[in-house]
Amino acid sequence: MARLLVEATLKPRRTTTTTRAVVGGSASMLPDVRGTASRETIVGYAHAGGPPLSAKQKAFANLFERMGLGDATAVTNRVVSKIANNLRFWPDDEHVVAATLSLFHELAASGAPSTKVLLDFDATRFLLERRAAPESLPFVARARPRHRTTLHATLARLVLAVVDDTQAAFAAFVEPLLATLAQLRTTAPAPGSPGSAHWNSLCVGVLRDLRGVAQAATTRRAYVMLFEALYPDAFEVLARAAEVTSDRDVLVALLRLVQELVSNKGQRITFDRSSPNGILLFREASRVVVAFGSKELQARGTPPCFRDDVDDVLGAPARGLGSPSSERTRRAKPPSSVLDGGHSSNGQAVGSDEYKRTHKAVVIALSAVSKALDGNYVNLGVFALYNDRALDDMLEVAVRLTLAAPIEDILAFPKLAVAYFTFYEVLFREHVAFVLLKDSETFATILAALHDALEVPHLAASAASTLDHLATYRFSSRTKPQLAPVRALDAHLASRPHALKRLLATILNQLLFGPPANHWVLTRPVLSLMLVDERGFVDYRDDLLASQHARPDLRQRLSDAFGTLVANVHRSLEPSNRDNFTQALSTFRHDVRQFLVC
């Protein structure tokens, strides 16, 4: 904190009175508020029936007295005044603005009793009243837009800490933002046009501001107040913006706001049992994602990037598949190897500009879809029950977006890869039937991508979980062949009968020959894949045993290890059986890696 308080002092001094006031802090442009809150409001609580001061608090109080700074209230007030002045007079210094906002956010999020008295300071009230005024706080127009998000998240947290009539205080806080949204609605550009620079700037600003407010709504009560303030008028503006604008900055800010709104962190999205708000929230998010995705796909104008090497990836394993040199490093490379002088599918060097121009908005949209599907605040089955296309349209657009980029581009950009495979993990867990009813070429392309991701350390967990969901569905539905998704899955696998065998072999190769730190995430799908393709596991075992022909003693040890692995395996995916097999597989891996000859 001390470093931040003198941050601006370390800058070259200027000669104007205003700058001296900011740098020196002795002649602040803000009103003198050192006496705004009395000592009793922040320190007196410890002596008037409140908890006693801790040793640390006593030490700081003694330090403040010796330094002549006054009590804790005066010190906090000085800090907040310095924060306000830094934001007013150092808008062009990225480091000062970022550090100042970080400190302000820490003060508001500290949860200390002093947090609530921050609203009593004139400096805080100044920031609340002038938070979106460039003439008072120039950094909101000049600095990176993310700083607006941080400022509003901090101020919203302070407003939500008000004990008396929080709802009225919050309504007054968001009212200027809602008025700006209404203004944007009446001046929206024509569909497909980039929009005027003023409209785009205003739109990005208010979307960033609202995202900060949404970040601060961490409790159920706060989120309900936010949703009721936004629905329905504000959501109409969001959907309209997604439909009409083609400006990338606006789209990124819009999708980030939607991503934050559908994120059920801390189970904050919990509406009353009879409330339809969960359904309404999902529908509004679907409108934005579908509008963006449809325009994005139309703008690209390219057919789906189906894999032309699917038969090679998912075809019959070659002999010697169980050896470390055959499959283990055959295809996918970690994104770092691509980024270090690599190239994307169009032959251009991979860089941040291409990511921002082509993939950034898609990454945020896929993340928003994943969070909406995984939010657990709405029964998604009601959409099909009442013939509502919100869910199906969102899933359709999301899948088409994943197919719009070749696998080389997906693996070349780490954020895109994470969003891609996280989405499919959620999709296969909650809506596997939707994927199975797609055409075989789409299904095979997804499986081939999952195969490649198994060999990328930071993607392996999502890919393995996705395959486990698929194999579990096939095993659990073996007695229901009449279901359309089951018939579709059988047809997909019949067209590529070695797909599951290849996937199982790749996982086992990674366990036995891959990075030691990555083995635990890969153990989960082994049992389910074994149960749906027992022949594939037997072939892998025989192949690996054959690779040890030069050492009969090691071959026998390997055979015994395989026997121990499957000794107590039951044809069941009950949690207890899964846990027992996972432990046995970890032991098998540890023992075999000690003596297996590569």
Image: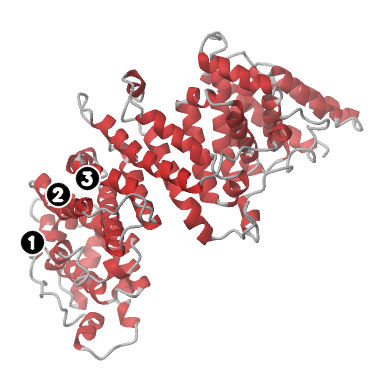
Q: Image quadrant of residue 500? A: top right
Q: Which residue is mark 3?
A: 234
User: Which mark is nearer the camera, 1 or 2?
Assistant: 2
Q: CA distance from mark 1 to mark 3?
A: 42 Å
Pointers 1 and 2 in contact (CB under 8 A)?
Answer: no
Frontmost residue, 563 versus 142: 142
Which mark identifies residue 224? none
Q: In the drawing, does residue 87 fall left or right of residue 252? A: left
At x 52% / y 60%, what residue is drawn? Answer: 352
Q: Amino acid at mark 1?
A: Glu
Outermost residue on the bottom side: it is 15
Quadrant of the rendering where the C terminus is positioned = top right
Nearest the camera: 446 or 554? 446
Q: Which mark is residue 40?
A: 1
Q: CA distance from mark 2 to mark 3?
A: 16 Å
Taking the spot 59% from the left edge, 49% from the top edge, the residue there is: 409
> How has the structure been colored for display?
secondary structure
Q: Earlier in the sequence, mark 1 or mark 3?
A: 1
- Note whether 145 is above or below 479 in the view shown: below
- Is residue 51 at least partly visible in the picture? no
| SS under mark 2 | helix
Q: Residues within 10 Å of mark 2 (few under 14, many from 20)?
A: many
Q: Residues within 10 Å of mark 1 (few under 14, many from 20)?
A: few
Q: Amino acid at mark 2?
A: Phe
Counting other residues with Cα less than 10 Å from the Cα at mark 3, is it few (<14), some (14-19), or many (20 or more)? many
- Indicate the amino acid at tag 3: Ala
What residue would you read off at disc 2? 170
- Name the residue located 24 percent from the left edge and 42 percent from the top edge: 236
Q: Earlier in the sequence, mark 2 or mark 3?
A: 2
Q: Assign a secondary structure to mark 3.
A: helix
Instruction: Give how far across and how far down residue 265 sits, in percent.
Output: 34, 40
